[in-house]
Image (spheres, rainbow, N blue to C red):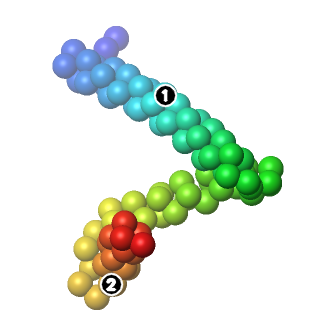
Amino acid sequence: MSDGPPSRIRADVSLRLQCACTLLVAVGAAYVSYRHGNQFALRYGADETIAALWPLVVDGLLLISTIELWKPHDPGASGQWKAWLYGEGAKYS
């Protein structure tokens, strides 16, 4: 028995493969980012606790900013503009 036409089955398999590959890349990137941030903090004098937390704080701020920018536009909301301004301001500070 088939769940649908062959093109639908191929699309489902393709989507699952794409999701699996995306997850693999995301896990690898998270690991590399954490290790790099941790080693950076240790190299420049942070203690073990701070070095363990530093990459989580940096990546967490990046994630929060990204989510804020992806929100649908609401004319009355100013959060999106704040995220853009703070992101742009960080470049020049």
Q: Position of residue 84 (x, y in %)?
A: 32, 72
Q: Amino acid at mark 1?
A: Leu
State how far apart marks 2 and 1 are (Cα): 35 Å
Extreme residue toward the top, this view: 1
- Image height check: is 55 above or below 85? above
Q: Position of residue 30 (x, y in %)?
A: 54, 40
Where on the picture, by quarter, is residue 53? bottom right
The numbered dot on residue 24 is 1
- Residue at coordinates 23% horizontally, 84% vertically from top-left? 75
Asked whether residue 38 appears in the rendered view, the answer is: no
Q: Position of residue 8 (x, y in %)?
A: 23, 23
Q: With 65 as the anchor, is 1 left or right in this view? A: left
Q: With 57 as the anchor, is 53 left or right in this view? A: right
Q: Nearer the viewer, residue 93 or 62?
A: 93
How many C-alpha atoms fall within 10 Å of the one at disc 1: few (<14), some, or many (≥20)? few
Where on the picture, by quarter, is residue 70? bottom left
- Image height check: is 25 above or below 76? above
- Residue at coordinates 80% horizontally, 50% vertically from top-left? 48
Q: With 47 as the anchor, is 92 left or right in this view? A: left
Extreme residue toward the bottom, this view: 76
Q: Amino acid at mark 2?
A: Ala
Extreme residue toward the right, this view: 48
The numbered dot on residue 77 is 2
Q: Position of residue 73 (x, y in %)?
A: 25, 74
